[in-house]
Image (cartoon, rainbow, N blue to C red):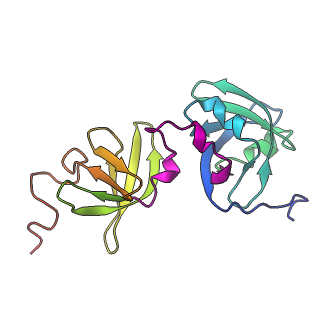
Amino acid sequence: MVDGKPRTKLENPVLMGVIGGAQGLRGEVRVKSFTDDVMAISDYGTLYDAEGRAYEILDAREHKNMVVIRFRGINDRNAAEALNGRELFVDRDSLPDEELDEEEYFYADLEGLEALDADGNSYGIISGIFDFGAGDILELTRPGKRSQLIPFSEQSVLEIDFEGGTILIDPMAAGLIDTEEKPGDGDE
């Protein structure tokens, strides 16, 4: 127990949002929500940070493309400012699988899939999904190589095969190769 609050270790954490700056003087914070509908972040109950601290949502309202949230125990601007940059998680088991359509999935489900082209050449494993403001980006990592970022678009990612553990990519559209050369050509 730290700060008088018990800690909860999530078995399979899924990132739901990131706390930004304070909003006003009463302890509210702006949260960038990673849910389809930004207000849906409040539908998952208590959120947890990476250290296992619980954040119970008392009030939430939409503000531009973010959510302004008041958490239990955060009652002034100083306490709210101290939360800046904190990532908020839920356990994967608390997400509603049965509500997903066949073409829907959680971004966390993409991590660990191998990126292959039509010829079976590997471009790495998805190790992260980011949104820097211009659309979603997949990070691909390979042992001994620098990680690469590709756009998560219909042109770059042609197919997702969760059962096979792969995604099919177009390396040209993804910006991984400049010509029709395959990986490894010219490396001799």
On the rendered image, what quadrant is the C terminus found in? bottom left
Q: How far across and down, in percent of the image, does residue 5 sit?
A: 87, 58
Q: Residue at x 81, y 45 (%)?
A: 79
- The residue lying at 17 percent from left, 63 percent from top is 183
**37 or 131: nearer the eye?**
37
Q: Which residues are magenta?
A: 88-113
Q: Where in the figure is residue 116, as x and y percent of width and height?
A: 27, 58
* Extreme residue in the right direction: 4
In the shown orientation, is residue 50 left or right of residue 143? right
On the picture, is 18 further left or further right than 70?
left
- Residue 12 shows in this picture: yes
Q: Quadrant of the N terminus?
A: bottom right
Establish if 166 lies above or below 94.
below
Tell me the quarter of the picture where residue 142 sits. bottom left
Q: Quadrant of residue 139?
A: bottom left
Instruction: State yes or no: residue 109 in magenta.
Output: yes
> Which of 111/135 is in front?
111
Count how many numbered circles sit on residues in the image.
Answer: 0
